[in-house]
Image: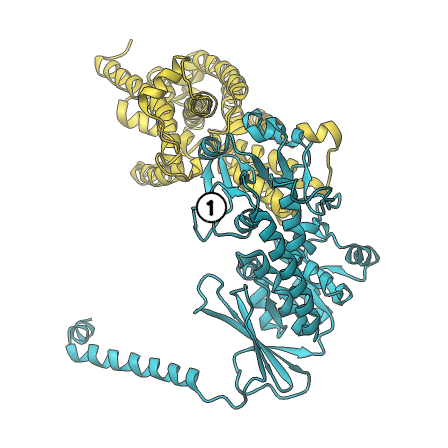
Chain colours: A cyan, B yellow
Amino acid sequence: MGYFISILSNKRFYCWLLLGFSVLAACDNQSALKQRHCHPTKTYYPKYAKGFWIEYFNGFKVIHLRDAYDTTKAIEDYVIYPKGKKKPADFPNAVAVFTPVQKNICLSTTHVGLLEILGITDSISGVVDGKRVYNKNVLRKLASGEVKVVGNEAGMNNELIFSMQPSVVLAYSFNEGNSSIPKLKSLGMSVMLINDYNEREPLARAEWLKVLASLYNLDDKADSILNDAEAAYNSLKTLAATAVKKPTVFCNMPWNDVWYMPSGDSYFSNFITDAGGDFLWRNNTSQRVLNLDYEVVYAKAAKADFLLNPNEANTLKDISAQGKRFENFEVFKQKKIYNNNLQQTATGGNDFWESGVAQPHLVLKDLISIFHPELIPNHQPIYYKQLQ
Amino acid sequence: MFSSRHILLFVVLAVLLCAAFVAQLFLGSVSVPAAEVFTILLGKGKDEILSRIILENRLPGAVGALIAGSALALSGLMMQILFRNPVAGPYVLGMSAGANLGVALLLMGSSFFSFSGILSKFFYSEWGIALAAAIGSSAVFLLVLLVAKRITQSVSLLIVGLMLGSAISAVVELLQTFAGKDELKQFVLWTFASFRHLTPQQVWVMAICCGFGFALSIKMMKPLQALQGGENFAQTVGIDTRRAKQTIIIATGILAGTVTAFCGPVAFIGLAVPHLCRMIFKTANTVTLTFACVLLGAVVCGFCNVAASMPGSEYALPVNVITSILGAPFVVYIIIKQPKTV
């Protein structure tokens, strides 16, 4: 014991310790700065998305994932190259995904939506929580057994996933808390994180189409889809900006006392602002969902013009069934409550969270027609419905 | 009847009770000037939104928290005396677990059964949840009652309650495994417990049910006093112990079941408050302890509700976060302070 104390009280010990750490840090920097053997022929930096970028090399691609909130933080790299070839030496730590990519497993229904826009839902061999799927093709295949349910929110069936041997398992960072993902990785499966949900701009979220497209060599198709979506989105945004009055808007419904409100710097907040609405919590730019007290929301939004996305509600009765107190809101009295579940299956599969993610211009059009019906007369909504 | 020291303590508790009630009305996430709260309470509030916040959001929650605190503390006291065990409470007898199961079956059992049409409107509303919780805790309570007829040892019954609780929790976990995201979230949030979502009608129902429970408990004061000396002692002083035990269990079931049904499983109040009363009042007299528990339970629950609303901040905390942070260390303290022989 006395020996340890004497070491700890020796100044020289700390000098050595410091030196040791600096050498380690220098080694780490060295490896990062190591000369690359090959150079990309093309680099794709998304216009809006912050969570990824892609490098194209001769014979392979590398998708770099980073934290959408702090782009200096790298998350993971994926190197996509032909099966049987040697793994590119420049990316020893990258997750390997072998081409041709054939079957995939979607751990989020959003992935189904992105694949649908690319026209390749046939590549799906497994999904999580089959009840939440909206896509007709996938539902049909689920019924016939061609597509399998590989688990639910509580857990995944690792053995089933492994036995299916998909080319890639599409996951999202949120799944990582789930013990299944490390297990699947240790079994040698290619697990790819699709972190579109961390993007705050609607067009940024849609840009994740590029990640999936690059797996299936559909990069050009994705470019043209995204260009069209961007053009449509921006012209609609310009149109909405011409509106004189901006209606006040709030979102969701509380669970017990806690009202989960999107932050001012979120996907929904940006949608509302771009559609010419005045989101009441626009100025709160927290990085996470706001857990507001019921009375705070009531004090601020009692006279608001519109309520969007009241959880699972289908009718005004569903809202008052949650508590008579909701009938006091002006939006309830004026029937100005809209939910994004116009296209929904009986079991809760909602197209808003599938194709809506990749088609932000269509969502924006719905929202503008809600806030400013005079700007888009006779619009047939695609995702949103007014609760009756 | 009471010593002068006890009377003084009752007065202090009564003052604190008023303070807890007033604090719940005056403090909240939205800051309302005290003068405005007074005008609103007098029915002369001009601002409709603030009036509704005070009268429809804070007032029912405030009354509900006081009733819940009293009811849980009293049921805890009766359990502890009945089972002669310092850590007995509605949790231990499996009643809270039973309420959990009822709600879990309703919210997450859709793979086994589901309601449609008008039935679904009712069952998936807060009334449906309350009913499910009440049915769940009553079912467990009936089971305990049946078992109580067969065994005479209080400790054995306690073990049966614990086992029942574990078995029920396993079923709840099974349901959670197969539940969807939203159902799971709704259930988990229910287990956090809350007072501020209570509507005036719910508070009325709570008050009536708990009033009945209080009346039964007051009737049981004498048998409870005798039971403190053990069942044999109670029998020698002429108490029909079996009947007394059944009535006490019924009273406890009503008190704890009603609160759990409407507010969710509020943690630790039932267990900790009776001990706090014993420490403050330094007595084993059940009459004193009954009134002390009713008052102190309300005071503690009221202030926990204020703390959970995090006055001045836009955010709110689940009530159980507060009751558990305060309650859990206290229970550990009680167990450590226990005489070694028990």
The x and y percentages for residue B153 are: 49, 29
Point out the image quarter for the C terminus of chain A. Answer: top right
Q: Which one is in front, A331 or A10?
A: A331
Dot 1: few (<14), some (14–19), or many (≥20) neighbours within 10 Å?
Answer: some
The x and y percentages for residue B53 are: 45, 25
Subunit under mark 1 = A
Work out which residue is located at the far top of the displayed protein and give it. Answer: B1
| Left or right side of A282 for B167 | right
> Image quarter for residue A196?
bottom right
Q: Name the residue type under label 1.
A: Arg
> Image quarter for residue B83?
top left
Residue at the (54%, 87%) spot, across then down: A39
Residue at the (23%, 81%) spot, across then down: A16
Q: Which one is in front, A109 or A231?
A: A231
Q: Is residue A114 visible?
A: yes
Q: Is residue A303 above or below residue A166?
A: above
The x and y percentages for residue B145 are: 58, 25
| Left or right side of A382 for A137 | right
User: In the rendered image, which residue does mark 1 sit on?
Assistant: A282
> Image quarter for residue A172?
bottom right
Q: Which one is in front, B1 or A80?
A: A80
Work out which residue is located at the far right of the displayed protein and give it. Answer: A144
The x and y percentages for residue B195 are: 46, 29
Q: Which one is in front, A262 or B8?
A: A262
Disc 1 secondary structure class: loop
| Left or right side of B62 for A245 | right
Q: Is residue A334 above or below residue A249?
A: above
Q: Is residue B143 visible?
A: no
Point out the image quarter for the N terminus of chain A. Answer: bottom left
